[in-house]
Amino acid sequence: MILPIVAYGDPVLKKVGQDIDPDYPKLDELLDNMFETMYNAYGVGLAAPQIGLPIRLFVIDAAPFADDEDLSEEEQKELTGFKKVFINAKITAEEGDEWAFNEGCLSIPDVREDVFRKSKVTIEYQDENFEKHVDTYDGLVARVIQHEYDHIDGILFTEKLSTLKKRLIKGRLENISKGKVNVEYKMKFPKQKKKR
Ligand SMILES: [Zn+2]
């Protein structure tokens, strides 16, 4: 089932997510719905707060990034197969030089900006079977993880921009929260006036 994606301005996007247990209700169904919602919106990642749940859960499928011809065959292969569930994640290290990547977010349609982040990330998490993992990633996979991880800590990529950039996009963000944006997928806008 496709779920509405929560738009910029909703307080749930600002909450620090709670850990979940293996007995979390209907987790399999939730994961199916999150992947379906993400694919429907042509996203590469979706975090639970974006569908209104303040829990430490996000899903990633980096396959759409594999089409980039500038990448090595090895990188393309890694991205193609990178479909994962991250539960109760904790980033334990971020290393390497900061690099800029033009990020977007399903909760902030039509806004894309360069964001600087470190190149390498080590993350502890549980998968959909609650098996524990500790993995280190770099490149685009690290980038998607950092973006989604920020969501479960209540942080949006627009908060990482310069003061000037923030000022420049302020009006557009306000419009998004009111539903004044063209978007192809189902969304829930916190400041949309109810239609009679
Ligand atoms: Zn996002």
Image (cartoon, grey):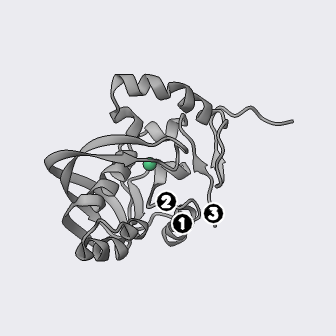
Provide residue 139's location: percent of width, then percent of height.
24, 59
Asked if the residue at label 2 sits under 8 Å from ligand 1, the reply is: yes
Asked if the residue at label 1 sits under 8 Å from ligand 1, the reply is: no
- Judged from this view, the residue extending furthest toward the front is 69
In the image: residue 136, left or right of residue 116: left
Residue 196 to residue 59: above or below? above
Q: Quadrant of the N terminus?
A: bottom right
Q: What is the crowding at mark 1: few (fewer than 14 residues within 10 Å), some, or many (at least 20)?
A: some
User: Could you give the CA–CA distance between mark 3 and mark 1, rounded to whole angstroms?
Assistant: 9 Å
Q: Quadrant of the C terminus?
A: top right
The kind of residue on which mark 2 rests is: Gly
In the image: residue 175, left or right of residue 116: right
- Judged from this view, the residue extending furthest toward the right is 196
Q: Earlier in the sequence, mark 3 or mark 1?
A: 3
Q: Nearer the viewer, mark 3 or mark 2?
A: 2
The kind of residue on which mark 1 rests is: Tyr
Q: Residue at x 53, y 71 (%)?
A: 32
Local secondary structure at mark 3: loop
Report the number of discs. Answer: 3
Q: What is the crowding at mark 3: few (fewer than 14 residues within 10 Å), some, or many (at least 20)?
A: some
Residue 116 appears in view = yes
User: Could you give the CA–CA distance between mark 1 and mark 2, rounded to whole angstroms?
Assistant: 6 Å
Local secondary structure at mark 2: loop
Q: Which residue is identified by label 2?
A: 43
The tag on residue 2 is 3
Residue 170 to residue 152: above or below? above
Provide residue 55's location: percent of width, then percent of height.
43, 52
Residue 180 to residue 51: above or below? above
User: Could you give the CA–CA distance between mark 3 and mark 2, rounded to whole angstroms?
Assistant: 13 Å
Q: Which residue is identified by label 1?
A: 39
